[in-house]
Image (spheres, rainbow, N blue to C red):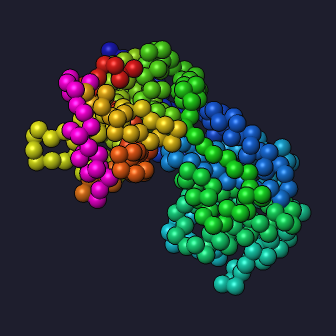
Amino acid sequence: MASRRELDDWTALWNEVAQVFSPGAPIDESDLFAGRITQLGDLINAVNQRGHHAIIFGERGVGKTSLANIFTNYVHRPVSRVVAKRINCDGISNFQNLWQRSFAELGIEAHVTASFGPDDIRMTLDSVSANYLPIIVFDEFDRLSSGRTKALLADTIKTLSDHSTSTTIVVVGVANSVSELLAEHASIGRALAEIPMPRMSDDEISEIIDKRAKRLGMSVDADVLRRIVAYSQGLPHYAHLIGLYAFQEAARLKTRNIDKFHLSNAIRSCIDKAQQTIRDSYDRATYSPRSDNLFKQVLLACSLAKVDSQGFFAAADVVQPLSAIMAKHYDIPSFARHLKEFCSTGRGFLLEQTGVKRKFRYRFKDPLMRPFITLQGVASDTIPRAYNP
């Protein structure tokens, strides 16, 4: 029987796992930040140049906010003078309250009136430049619903750049391109360092797990690490989610090595405790009163289909995985209706469609959905061996 001290040690380890894996929150500790060397270097270069600003964009769940959180630790300006603040945007934010919040966070006494414009912002920031160097991160920029607010923020960035103001603005948002995030205001590109955030490489996902294993004094079987990397599909969110439950399962069973058994239980936990919106969307997309329906199988095949650099796949890419799942050949007409329905309101617009008839391409609207469906296939043992790493 384990002693009370031993039990306390394993409980402490279980709790520590939850502190180093963070699927629900951005990374805010440099030692635990993994990969993104190119993006980090580009961002630091932008901040170190007066009058230069930056925009970080990419899919949901690729670690944009984590990068914005930790990059100031590497800025070469005098650290004692750098003051970085992150302001979250939302659907009701306007230009004035965003800057009122920014000034409050920076400790600047300013009454932002309805007539406050870009030049007023510049002069207010210039008044404190002798004391410190502000870095203001406007996160979730894509959630701004007001075109006027976006336009004024773009004009402010241009004004700060034109006057070489020491303040740096960093815009962060979900988008495939700068023009998509800034719309008609992308003309300020000269003042912005564009920093796209692609999905992480296999080595970068491995680094997430390796760094935390070393911090915890734990180890991971090579085959298990390979599976975690594959199941994460380049999204750090899933590396953290799977890692959290796998490492906690090992601690619960009083071992410091993670094997296939711990991973198997972790996958079930990932499905049970995934974001409610993900689970609801999956259930809505696959529900049918008919027991012989193919919605789950077609959706799993979509998650296994080969995709291009933008995450799109064609109907032809679904043929092989669906045939493997069903153990018999399926051609496109047998599931074309399913693809169409996945793009409709009735199935929650799970997929988005682009292109023209007979050349349509499809992509999961929420990038977090595809790995979730794959994990569902692993947990239910319906994923074909050829597609299970």
Q: What segment is highlighted magenta in the picture?
A: 324-345
Q: Position of residue 235 (x, y in %)?
A: 50, 37
Please give left or right for residue 320 compared with residue 187 in the image: left
Q: Is residue 330 magenta?
A: yes
Instruction: Tell me the residue at 84%/66% (across/down).
Output: 162
The residue at the point 55 percent across, 73 percent down is 146
- Residue 297, relative to residue 353: is it above or below? above
**Viewer-proximal residue, 168 or 175?**
175
Q: Nearer the viewer, residue 27 or 372?
A: 372
Quadrant in the picture for residue 172: bottom right
Asked if 346 appears above or below 125 in the picture, the reply is above
Residue 230 visible somewhere in the drawing = yes
Q: How many marks?
A: 0
Whether residue 64 sits left or right of residue 298 in the image: it is right
| Quarter of the figure with residue 95 | bottom right
Position of 368 relative to 384 (above/below)? below
Q: In which quadrant of the rendered view does residue 94 lie?
A: bottom right
Query: Residue 99, image x and y in percent?
Result: 67, 71
Question: Outermost residue toward the right?
Answer: 130
* Residue at image coords 74%, 43%: 42
Residue at 30% x, 31% y: name it.
Answer: 319
Whether residue 15 is visible: no
Which is more toward the observer, 271 or 370? 370
Q: Main secondary structure of the magenta part?
A: helix
Rendered-image quadrant of the C terminus: top left
Q: Position of residue 185 (x, y in %)?
A: 66, 66
Quick check: 228 above or below 285? above
* Image quadrant occupied by the N terminus: top left
Percent of width and height locating residue 315: 34, 39
Was residue 9 drawn as part of the magenta stretch in this picture? no
